[in-house]
Image (cartoon, helix red, strand yellow):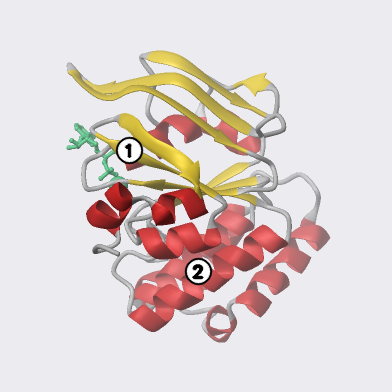
Amino acid sequence: MPEALLSLRGVEAAYGPVAVLHGIDIDVGADEVVCLLGGNAAGKTTTMKTIIGVQPTTAGTLTYDGTEITGMSPPDIVGRGIAIVPEGRRIFPRLSVQENLDLGAYDRTDGRAAIHADLEKIFGLFPRLAERRTQQGGTLSGGEQQMLAIGRALMARPRLLLMDEPSMGLAPALVDQVFEIIADIHASGTAIFLVEQNARMALEVASRGYVLQQGRVVVEGTSAELLASDAIAEAYLGGH
Ligand SMILES: Nc1ncnc2c1ncn2[C@@H]1O[C@H](COP(=O)(O)OP(=O)(O)O)[C@@H](O)[C@H]1O
Ligand SMILES: [Mg+2]
């Protein structure tokens, strides 16, 4: 693989005395969709939090775009071009759809016209948000809130988008739509690091994947390799 956009090397993290990540190595290339699979409590969200700087690491290094970002503050990391769609679609319920999207762009310095153009692009991608642009975020359906969370992250114009279980709790038709949107975002030139419990769909959109178990990467490979693996099939795909 060419030099990765994001690299984790030997990353460890802990909550108080409890170690949760035990030295993980992950790479995401600039033109890739990479997925992180694993059961509940494997450490997937913690991995995302270490990348965005919300969770300090206790060992190891994180490198983004050739610069070590280990220990940087979340705003510094976001300012370098990483955005996150957090677990559980955390939007601002009292703010309108448009205000939520505007907040995604708070860090941009390229001017109102460019931001406005992107806002219209997001409304083009999510017509249901366009129809509801003055409605309070908290009054949207679960699926619409997920679209809003994705739209807000895109408003930062990230080079790398982190997505933590974007399909969780959505009806099957909406899950399909979320995966179509992931493919669209990738096609427009954004690298994606995707945490999913929906392993089969994640491996369809991703080119490579890692499986995390109790804070360790236990399997990694191309999506084709992981889809063909009996161990993965048994643990995550409901058998072959
Ligand atoms: N804020 C926290 N304080 C203490 N323990 C936590 C906290 N967040 C997560 N954990 C623990 O860390 C482990 C990994 O959690 P998490 O990264 O959320 O897993 P996943 O996203 O794979 O379900 C779990 O055992 C969880 O209970
Ligand atoms: Mg999680």
Q: Quadrant of the C terminus?
A: bottom left
The answer to whether mark 1 is within 8 Å of ligand 1 is yes
Which mark lies nearer to you, 2 or 1? Answer: 1
Q: Which residue is mark 1?
A: 212
Amino acid type of the residue that numbered disc 1 sits on in the rendered structure:
Leu
Residue 112 appears in the figure: yes
Q: Nearer the viewer, residue 7 or 91?
A: 7
Disc on res. 92: none
Q: Quadrant of the N terminus?
A: top right
The answer to whether mark 2 is within 8 Å of ligand 2 is no
- Image position, residue 56 (x, y; %): 39, 22
Above or below for 65 versus 32: above
Q: Residue at x 69, y 42 (%)?
A: 30
Amino acid type of the residue that numbered disc 2 sits on in the rendered structure:
Phe
Above or below for 129 versus 110: below
The Cα–Cα distance between marks 2 and 1, rounded to whole angstroms, is 21 Å
User: Helix, strand, or loop for circle 1?
Assistant: strand
Q: Nearer the viewer, residue 106 or 88?
A: 88
Residue 43 appears in the figure: no
Q: Residue at x 45, y 59 (%)?
A: 202
* Residue lying farthest to the left in this orientation: 17
- Image position, residue 58 (x, y; %): 36, 14
Q: Are marks 2 and 1 in contact (CB under 8 Å)?
A: no
Horizontal placement of 61 versus 155: left or right? left
Which comes sooner in the sequence, label 2 or label 1? 2
Horizontal placement of 31 versus 93: left or right? right
User: Helix, strand, or loop for circle 2?
Assistant: helix
Horizontal placement of 117 versus 54: left or right? right
* Circle 2 residues within 10 Å: few <14, some 14–19, many ≥20: some
Q: Residue at x 67, y 52 (%)?
A: 190
Q: Which residue is mark 2?
A: 179
Above or below for 63 versus 117: above
